[in-house]
Amino acid sequence: MSRPVVIRVALVALLFAVLAGALYFTPKPAPATEKSFTLVLKDNALASGSSVMTVNQGDTVALHVQSDRGLHLELHGYEKEFDVGSDGEATLNFVADKSGRFFLHAHGANDEHIEIATIEVQPR
Ligand SMILES: [Cu+2]
């Protein structure tokens, strides 16, 4: 082989090695998992639990809510509504298929929207 051909072959081989390395080291998104959160509410406000819950898009989320009073809750953006009844507990299960920030509200009488917490869904 002449020298220019050898150089060209070497460059192509180098290019492939760099591309393979780049593919190998590209961070892969974490696999979808199940995330579980518990929020404890007192007087329609968060008494314990995280006010910002972070998950990855595709995760299955279980949101457990305990409250000292009956409540109607809505996760805006996902349009999921659920009620805490007389037993003081409720769980919302959903797949976080949309990314963004979503507000969990308690909806009271007189059309109140009381902010309880936020769910942040990181895009994939
Ligand atoms: Cu609302």
Image (cartoon, helix red, strand yellow):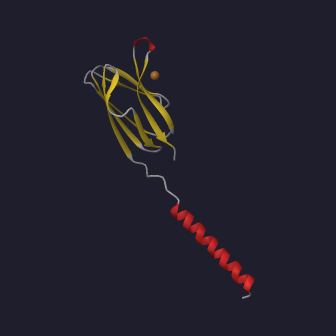
Q: Which residue extends farthest bottom? A: 1
| Apparent side of residue 122 relative to residue 51 in the rendered image (left or right) | right
Residue drawn where x is 62% and y is 74% of the image: 14
Quadrant containing the N terminus is: bottom right
Identify which residue, 85 or 37, lies in the foreground.
37
Q: How many marks?
A: 0
Residue drawn where x is 51% and y is 44% of the image: 123
Give the vertical position of 3 relative to 109 (above or below): below
Q: Position of residue 82 (x, y in %)?
A: 38, 26
Give the vertical position of 41 relative to 7 (above or below): above
Residue drawn where x is 70% and y is 80% of the image: 7
Q: Position of residue 98 (x, y in %)?
A: 51, 39
Q: Which residue extends farthest left? A: 87
- Asked where in the image residue 43 lies, by quadrant, the reply is top left
Give the vertical position of 22 relative to 80 (above or below): below
Q: Position of residue 116 (x, y in %)?
A: 39, 26
Residue drawn where x is 60% and y is 67% of the image: 19
Identify which residue, 28 or 70, lies in the foreground.
28
Identify which residue, 93 or 25, lies in the foreground.
25
